[in-house]
Image (tube, rainbow, N blue to C red):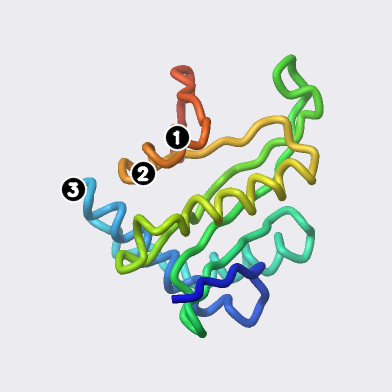
Amino acid sequence: MNIEYKRLTEKELDTIIKMRIDQLTEEYTSAGKTVPEDVDLEQALMDFYKKNMAAGTYVSWLAFDGDRIVGTSGMSFAEKPPYFTCPSGKLGILSSMYTDPEYRRMGIATALLDKVVKEAKDYGCGTIYITASDMGVKLYESYGFQHNGNFLQYYF
């Protein structure tokens, strides 16, 4: 096995969208939730990726075994008013971390995380946020991510 890492381009978008939906479905069902049948993510994901890749506010690195994508990562960039622990006000929002079950526990997720964390640092981010699945928490903790007990969400 020879894993190669490449940045996401538009030619991989159809595959990445399918993988993203599979990832979200796996996370929902493993948490005992029912996947909403009335939500069609395909076009929304395509629009998101194209718009944000073109604007430079989203990057993704992929792991390939030959022609097969076996791991994904993503980093969105945002800004908010600067604060003491993030004087640049630039934030990275980590998402889409996924490794094919056949390729887990081989260091692929860590290698992908290295690449998108470097992208965030190069962009000038002072902080990276993630909402982690139960499966991913150990990876992020071992990488140095820390829990923020004040993080809350509001849904519409």
Where is 36 relative to 135, above or below? below
Q: Are marks 2 and 1 in contact (CB under 8 Å)?
A: no
Q: Residue at x 52, y 74 (%)?
A: 64
Q: Residue at x 28, y 52 (%)?
A: 28
Which residue is under mark 1? 142
Location of residue 121 in the rendering, given as x and y in whole percent from the top left corner? 74, 41
Q: Residues within 10 Å of mark 1 (few under 14, many from 20)?
A: few
Question: Which mark, residue 63?
Answer: none
Q: Is residue 29 left or right of residue 103?
A: left
Where is 121 relative to 4, above or below? above
* Mark before the other along the chain sequence, 2 or 1: 2
The amino acid at mark 1 is Ser
Distance from label 2 to label 3 (Cα)? 13 Å
Task: Report the quarter where the N terminus lies.
Answer: bottom left
Distance from label 1 to label 3 (Cα)? 26 Å
Frontmost residue, 39 versus 92: 92
Element assignment for label 1 = helix
Q: Residues within 10 Å of mark 2 (few under 14, many from 20)?
A: some
**Count of labels in the image:** 3
Question: Which mark, residue 133?
Answer: 2
> Which residue is farthest top?
84
The amino acid at mark 3 is Gly
Where is 9 relative to 53, above or below? below
* Mark before the other along the chain sequence, 2 or 3: 3
Location of residue 83 in the rendering, given as x and y in whole percent from the top left corner? 74, 18
Which residue is under mark 3? 32
